[in-house]
Image (cartoon, rainbow, N blue to C red):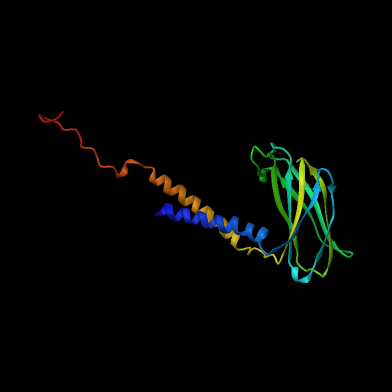
Amino acid sequence: FMRVLSILCLLAGIGLGILYPNYITYYSGGEIGTWTVFTRQTGFKPVTVELSKNDAPVLLVVKMDSLGNILQTNAETTLTLTAATGNRTVLAEVMTFRASTADTKTPQYPGASYTVSPGVISAVDDAPYLIVIGPGDQDMIDMKQVTLSLRRNSLAADPRYQPAGFILMALGFIGLILSISRGGGGGKNEPEKPGMKWGREGV
């Protein structure tokens, strides 16, 4: 029973601590569009997007595809992003893509994909927004392509759920280890073997 309860606790923790915030961050709301902002042939290109007040809040998601296999776990690339409307900058962030967090592809299609969210535009006007992505200080990963996606009416993950998920994951993991160690005693429940007999009928 303890093992089953620990597994359920671990799964609930993974759902609250990892799956829930990722789903809310990258998949809530509706997609406005996706644009390719960098290729090896064209370099970086700015994007102008018409937004309306009904789109708020607008979530920005940047995906970077690398070329070839990434062998260095400490390799990273930084990109800068600014979003502005009129003469007002509404978002300015630095994004870091680390090899240790890459989603590695299959051997037939070498390389890796990285996805980050630089932020949210909370208040949106009925106006065009200029979004510029460019290189940062670090460039150790050979970039193949960078795409920008915008999602309207994005939700914010409840900040209480992720810590609770991590606690459940820890409790479930500890409980699972304890249940395995207790169950590994092996011969405690086995019937006792008859002792040796002494005397005339003994062996």
Give residue 191's position: percent from left, percent from top.
25, 42
Give left or right: position of 33 versus 16.
right
Q: Total marks drawn? A: 0
Give residue 59's position: percent from left, percent from top.
73, 61
Q: Is residue 130 above or below residue 137?
A: below
Q: Is residue 187 above or below residue 121?
A: above
Residue drawn at the location 46% of the way across and 52% of the way down: 175
Q: Quadrant of residue 73?
A: top right
Q: Nearer the viewer, residue 29 or 72?
A: 29
Residue furthest right in the image? 87
Q: Is residue 77 above or below residue 169?
A: above
Q: Quadrant of residue 72?
A: top right
Give left or right: position of 15 versus 69.
left
Q: Quadrant of residue 28?
A: bottom right
Residue drawn at the location 84% of the way across and 46% of the way down: 42
Give residue 4's position: percent from left, percent from top.
43, 54
Q: Nearer the viewer, residue 51 or 81?
A: 51
Q: Which quadrant of the rendered structure holds the C terminus?
A: top left
Residue furthest left in the image? 200
Residue drawn at the location 44% of the way across and 56% of the way down: 5
Give left or right: position of 136 versus 107.
right
Q: Which quadrant of the rendered structure holds the N terminus?
A: bottom left
